[in-house]
Amino acid sequence: MGDEKLPTSVPHGSEPTVTDFAGILLAELSSFSARAIRDATQMVNLVEVSIAPYTSLLRPWREFFTIELPDLDSDPDFLQRIVRNIAYFQANYLMIGSVMFAVAVYRHTSWLLAILLLAGFWAAYIARGGFDPHWKPVVFGTEITASHRLALLYAGSLSLIFLVFGQALLVLLGILGTLTATHALCHAGPPKPAAPVAAAAGGGEVKAKIRAIV
C-alpha cells in the first residue's frame, strides 16, 4: 500500500483535502472554459461568414421607409413590382423578421427554453466533431454519415419547435408575409440609373462645331 502512487497534486503520504479537490476542479473548469471559448469563437466566425452576403445587401433604412400609395392604373403589373422589391430589400425584411422573432421568443419562457436547449445541443454537437466527414458510426447495420446526422438534427429541431410554438410561429410568419407584400407593393422600387443625357448632348455640340469648322 505504501508503494502506491498518489496524484501529483496531492503530497505523498497525505490524504487528499478539500483544497486539493478544489484545485483539480478549478483546473478542469479552466480547461473546459478555454475549449468553450475556442468553440464559441469558431461559431461566431462561421456565423459572420454566413451572414456577410446579407449584410452587404442591406439597403439604407431611409430608402426602405420611403413608401407611397401605388397607382395600379399606370402600373398594372404590380406582381412584378412586388417580386422586384422583395429581391431588392430581402436583407431588410430578413433583419426585421429576425428581430420580431427574437422579441417573441424573449417574451415567452417556454419558447426561450426550447431555443436555448436547441442552441446548447447544436453547440455540443459541433464541439464534439459532429461535422467530421470521417466519423461514420454504424447503427443497426446502417452507416450514418455527416449528411445523415445533419438531416436528423434538422428534423429533430423543427419537430421540437413546432411542438412548443408551431402554431404561433405560423401566425407570425403569416403576419410577416403580409407586411412584406404590402411594403413591396407600396414602395416605388430601386432607383433607376440616370440616362447619360448630358454626355450625349455634349457629344452632339462637339460634332456640330466640327461640321461648322469644316
Image (cartoon, helix red, strand yellow):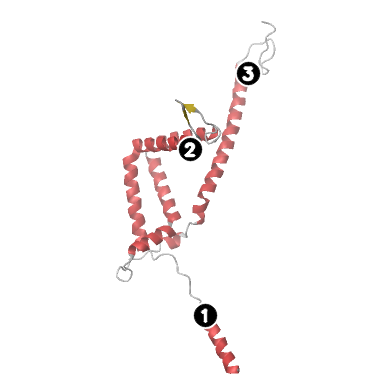
Judged from this view, the residue extending furthest toward the front is 141
Along the viewing direction, whichever of 214 and 209 lies nearer the viewer? 214
Which quadrant: the N terminus?
top right
Q: Which mark is residue 27?
A: none
Say whether marks 3 and 2 touch (CB < 8 Å). no
Residue type indicated by callout 3: Asp
Q: How far apart are the alpha carbons under marks 1 and 2?
A: 57 Å
In primary-sequence order, the first of circles 3 and 1 is 3
Q: Which residue is mark 1?
A: 198
Residue type indicated by callout 1: Ala
Q: Residue at x 40, y 37 (%)?
A: 155
Q: Which tag is nearer the camera, tag 1 or tag 2? A: 2
Residue 99 as seen in the image, left or right of residue 7: left
Q: How far apart are the alpha carbons under marks 3 and 1?
A: 83 Å
Q: Which tag is nearer the camera, tag 3 or tag 1? A: 1
Q: Position of residue 97 (x, y in %)?
A: 40, 50
Say if 210 sits above or below 123 in the image: below
Badge 3 density bin: few <14, some 14–19, many ≥20, Cα 10 Å: some
Q: Which residue is mark 3?
A: 20
Judged from this view, the residue extending furthest toward the top is 1
Badge 2 density bin: few <14, some 14–19, many ≥20, Cα 10 Å: few
Q: Position of residue 143 (x, y in %)?
A: 48, 30
Say if 138 sits above or below 40 in the image: above
Q: Which residue is mark 2?
A: 147
Q: Position of residue 206 (x, y in %)?
A: 57, 86
Location of residue 84 (image quadrant): bottom left
Along the viewing direction, whichever of 34 and 84 lies nearer the viewer? 84
